[in-house]
Amino acid sequence: MIIFGTSGYLYQLAILMLTCPRCGNPAAQTVRKYVTKFTLFFVPLFPITTRWTIQCTFCGREQEVSKEWAEQSQAQAAGAPAYGQAQQTYQHSGA
């Protein structure tokens, strides 16, 4: 008997202060990475799908973003100034 399936993993990559295009509030936006991995006997072996999203902590809107945008945001968050000093609006087109 072989037991196989998938497991989902959620990674929080960064938290940015951005203005949400839906609610218009400057709020924390979490950049997340969702990974689905193939499992064999409950051991995760390799990723099947990966997607990146950004979610507004004020209204809950979640939008899929590109890998490049997520990595750029993560690098920006690593060197970001103190809370409340940097605010920007994110606009994403595509995917």
Image: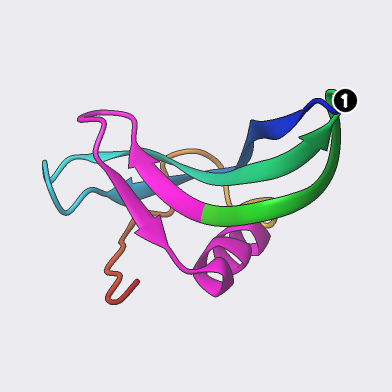
Q: Is residue 47 above or below residue 56?
A: below
Q: Decide which of 72, 66 is in the foreground and name it.
A: 66
Snapshot quadrant of residue 56: top left
State the image coordinates of residue 50 (x, y, percent, origin top left). 60, 55
The residue lying toward the viewer, choosing from 24 and 42, is 42
Is 33 left, or right, of 17 in this rendering? right
| Dot 1: element | loop
Residue 19, above or below 1: below
Q: The residue under label 1 is which amino acid type?
A: Phe
- Residue at x 11% of width, y 41% of height: 23
Check residue 72 for magenta coloring.
yes
Quarter of the image with the C terminus is bottom left
Q: Position of residue 79 (x, y in %)?
A: 68, 57
The percent coordinates of residue 2 (x first, y second) are: 85, 28
The image shows residue 75, relative to residue 18, as above or below, that is below
Q: What stretch is highlighted in magenta?
A: 52-76
Q: In this view, does 83 lie above or below 66?
A: above
Identify which residue is drawn at 67% across, 35% down. 6
Say whether residue 63 is magenta.
yes
Residue extending furthest left?
A: 23
- Left or right: where 31 falls relative to 18: right
Residue at point 30%, 76% (across, down) = 94
Name the one closer to the observer, 80 or 32: 32
Write down the residue under mark 1: 41
Query: Can you give x and y, in whole percent of width and height, for residue 45 in the image?
Result: 87, 43
Picture residue at 20% right of the left edge, 30% below the top: 59
Tell me the quadrant of the picture where the N terminus can be found: top right
Left or right? Give the position of 30 relative to 68. left
